[in-house]
Image (cartoon, rainbow, N blue to C red):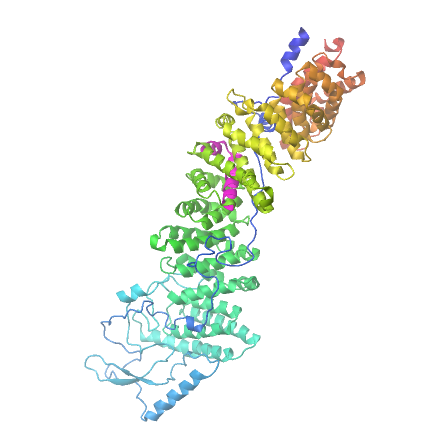
Amino acid sequence: MASMERKHEICSPFIPRRSALTKTSAEIVSEARQSLRVQSTQRPFTPRDGHRQLFGKSSVRADCGSRPPSTFSLHTQNFDAPDSRPGSGTRLSPLDHKPKFPVPCDAEDAFKAFPKPPADPLEVKKGLAGARARLLRAGSLTTLPPVEGHTDATERVNPGPGQKQLSAKRLPATDHTKVYGGPRKPGPHRAASESRIKQPGVDSGLRPTDCTTGRRTEMGDGDDTTSKEEDAESLMWNNKIGPLLQELETVAAGSSEASVDRLCDLCDGLRGTLAEADMLGRRCKRRSGILRALFHLIDLNSAQLNLHIAKLCLALCVSGNNLLNICKLIFQISRSESNDILFQNNSIIDSLLGVLSNEDVSTSGEALLYCVGTLKFLSGNSAILRLLLDKNCVSVAQKLIQRLHTLDETHFTMAGHILVQLTATLRNLADHPDSRPLFVSFSVLSELCLVLRHHCKDQDICTNISRIYSKLSSYSECRLALAQTPDCYRLFLELLSKHHQKQDLVVRLLFTLGNLTAKGEEARQELYRCEGCVDTLLRLYDSYQRRQTGAPSSSKPPVSAREDDDVLVKLVRVLANMCIHPAVGPALASNTTFIQLLMETLELRSVQESEELLVNVAATINNLSFYQEESSAIRHSRLTISNLMLKLVLSCSMDAMLEATRVYGNLSQSKDVRDFIIQNKVHQFAVTLLDSKSTEMCFSACGVLTNLALDPPNRVSLSLEAAAAKLVDCLRDLGPGDWQLAGQVCQALWNLISGGSEKLLDTQETESLLEVLITYSDEEEALKWIENADMRDFHKACWELEFLPVAQKLMKTLQPPDLTE
């Protein structure tokens, strides 16, 4: 009778324990190990696109005729010579002001200071002939302005009221289309027809007013300037700028590699000179002449030189068509990976970030598109990727996204094109570990959720953002930031439903949801509570399962089959993680559609072809089998599931064997499943696993043996397999390193021995077991192997709670009566 009471006290099925009370460290590990398990999987692989294009072959825009091109030709004639002329061709209204001539005048005689026209018209003809000869000379930079003081021809000047008509020397033809007629303020027509560029932000060398206030046209300054300022600019032009431009023309006539290097140096020197004289932006009266000279150098077709030209043009605040063509020029250069080194050794990246920070997206959208496209290409280079992070590219991108949100419907298409490039750039930046704090601090993850809402129909944008999330959600700080974004779960479910056929988008959204639900109870419940959550996920499950089974295997390309499998792997993982929540698990365990889909997967797939999928399905069933409510579909289908698990047990996959053994450990709480195990000789397999030397394998096998030993007939079957002796060996070899395992071994031994089958062990084996139990029951001896002080408390808790109680009772059973009294 005492023996039966002792048996009732200790002998119990291998049932996972769960407590709502505060758990000790040992209980936390016990719960995770014995029952509900979070599933892990690999992040979907994203192959690198070998072709640098705005829109790759997989893009939905690839066959769209209206998309911006990736290839084009750029030459001098593509640029507008007077950069400030109205792009619309609208005729400007006359300006109401008193003309002011550029030459300082004597107050008493306004005309005294003007040079007289040539006395002989032949002089004029001679001067024109010389100019034409220079214009027609092959390879000449036709628009370089001469040094001040040397003019080519005369032009009639319209006098003001009460003045006589005069002849004045024309200002250099390369500077102006008309003689300077005094200060001009941009009128309403000019403001409407010309794009205005704001201050380039990063290291542009420009003051805040360069491109936004007090702006000059190529005709002159918008503000009244004193003669002293004009004299200073003329002096700078004559002494430094003019000679640099003339040297540019001279060197450009050569064609050697050395001349290209010299031209690059001259461009840098010109930029430095203009910066020193505070003449960058639109501050220089003869800015258009400088631009014309630079534009003509583009025909030399040197990538190195063109980057220097582009940097200087951006510093001079080109706008409109010229800004677009400069951005195209830089984009064209960046398409070749061999040119990446040029961007590393040039501050052009600062100029590009300045354009993105300040340019008006509604008027210069196409220029921004090519600017961001360049950054997308460059961010594929690891060295430049580091530069982009250092230059605060993540912040620039976040602010640009915010500005794109404000665009109206007329610019929606261009905003989408830009966002495709921008999200692809962020996808590349997300690869670097140092980007993660930036994505969090600048709230980029939540901004991207807004993009998804606004552009939910755009598969290119959605796919790029899903790739960003799949990368970053593997890290706790990013996962937390994303989980705190309002309605992100509902948004993901809507996208899964809308784009259910787009495998590369679906698999990444599921991977992200799997990451979110892997670590937090709140995430599991919040996802489950979203309207239509389970229905959406199960429709996806059924759809991708039918894609595999609906067509003959020979007609399904191997790559496509693996991709479909990957979707199911990620999908089952999400469901497995969700059912860990105590309020979600019972509902999912009672969902017959869900359980039927899981069993179909086990039936239709082979371990050889779909190992990870079947392992995840078995792990999900294991989690669901924790819930033993009467309504559980797992409980009602336990024998069918037990039969399906045989293919995993008999496979060559250790992971599949392990998950199947865990399932048998839970299902064998039922008598009919225990009978099935004995009939199909699964118990032999469980005993063999004790020799694996794997603590996880041994732990799962002990769970099955513990439950089997509840039935007296089964103890005989186990004794024939020498189960008790193998359990003793397992305790001796693995116990000190894993007190949970040691406790489970003792429980299995107790069930085998305490039912009157002590003879399962001979005298020597019994003495050996007692010696091990006595040794391990000594705290000092048991914990002496634990060197890590932080882990010592954890192991001590496991030893006290999991091992010691059952070990002491087992010793009482084995010891002779005179020793136990």
Considering every residue shown, the one lying at the far top of the view is 1
Considering every residue shown, the one lying at the far left of the view is 162
Q: Is residue 409 left or right of residue 476?
A: left
Residue at the spot 45% in from the left edge and 79% down from the top edge: 141
The reply to whether residue 18 is in sight is no
Quadrant housing the C terminus: top right
The magenta segment is 504-527
In the foreground, 24 or 278: 24
Q: Is residue 322 left or right of residue 805?
A: left
Quadrant housing the N terminus: top right
Q: Is residue 537 above or below residue 464?
A: above
Residue at the spot 43% in from the left edge and 66% down from the top edge: 325
Q: Is residue 775 above or below residue 495?
A: above
**790 in the magenta segment:** no
x and y percentages locating residue 136 in the rendered image: 44, 83
In the foreground, 181 or 716: 716
x and y percentages locating residue 383 in the rendered image: 57, 57
**Magenta stretch, overall SS:** helix
**518 in the magenta segment:** yes
x and y percentages locating residue 725 in the rendered image: 76, 22
Q: Is residue 219 left or right of residue 343?
A: left
x and y percentages locating residue 15 in the rendered image: 60, 21
